[in-house]
Amino acid sequence: MSHNEYDCRLLADMKDLDIELLKENPNTYGLLKCLLLREDPENGSYYEQLLQMESHLEERRGSEIWQELQKNIVEPVLQAGLTKHLKDGQSVDETLLQTFLGIIDVNCFEIRAPDEGQLRGLYPRTALMAHSCVANVQISNDENYLMKVFATCDVTKGELLYNCYTNVLLVCTI
């Protein structure tokens, strides 16, 4: 992760943003990054990639997870006054924010942080891999958070790559 000058400048210019509300709700940071990506004209292709990812929006709508995210992430972001500073802020609504949160939940990978904590990272191409409890790849991240995918067996050209998206210690039926 590195400093993003565009994001920093944009946030610094939001003088009446309730930054304390966002700090009290650190789970808002991923959603905030999606909104900042949407604003940055130099990252339009990344934003388009983000929008192409699966969110399971309709399956999640009204569910317990939807309600929890609404209370702990969506409402604080909306209450912080962020949307009035965005180019197309009037189009930022519950559905868009829940779509971003769905994309994050469905497609992110857990990453070990240098301080032994955990982060989540969004890797669009790797997120497209099919799931199998008997994976044929192993995934790791280097010190720069670059994802590396290694085959765990011989893989022929054109063969699907499978990653196990669940905890391998959980019961899995094949």
Image (cartoon, grey):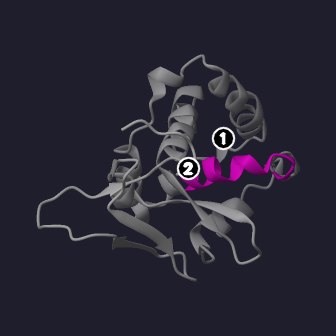
The C terminus appears in which quarter of the rendering? top left
What residue is drawn where x is 71% and y is 47%? 28
What residue is drawn where x is 65% and y is 28%? 65
In the image, the segment drawn in magenta is: 23-36
| Depth order, front residue of 63/74 | 63
The amino acid type of the residue labelled 1 equals Lys
What residue is drawn where x is 32% and y is 61%? 136
Q: Can residue 45 be seen by looking at this rendering? A: no
Helix, strand or loop for the magenta stretch, by majority: helix
Q: Is residue 148 left or right of residue 162?
A: right
Q: Is residue 118 left or right of residue 163?
A: right
Task: Give the crowd class for mark 2: few <14, some 14-19, many >=20 residues within 10 Å.
Answer: few
The N terminus appears in which quarter of the rendering? bottom right
What residue is drawn where x is 83% and y is 47%? 18
The residue singled out by tag 1 in the image is 84
Q: Secondary structure at mark 2?
A: loop
Position above or below: 23 against 147? above
Q: Secondary structure at mark 1?
A: helix
The amino acid type of the residue labelled 2 equals Asn
The part of the image, by quadrant, that contains residue 110 is bottom right
Give coordinates of residue 156: x percent, y percent: 13, 67
Q: CA distance from mark 2 to mark 1?
A: 41 Å
| Depth order, front residue of 114/67 | 114
Indicate which disc, 2 or 1, sits on the residue closer to the N terminus. Answer: 1
The residue singled out by tag 2 in the image is 167
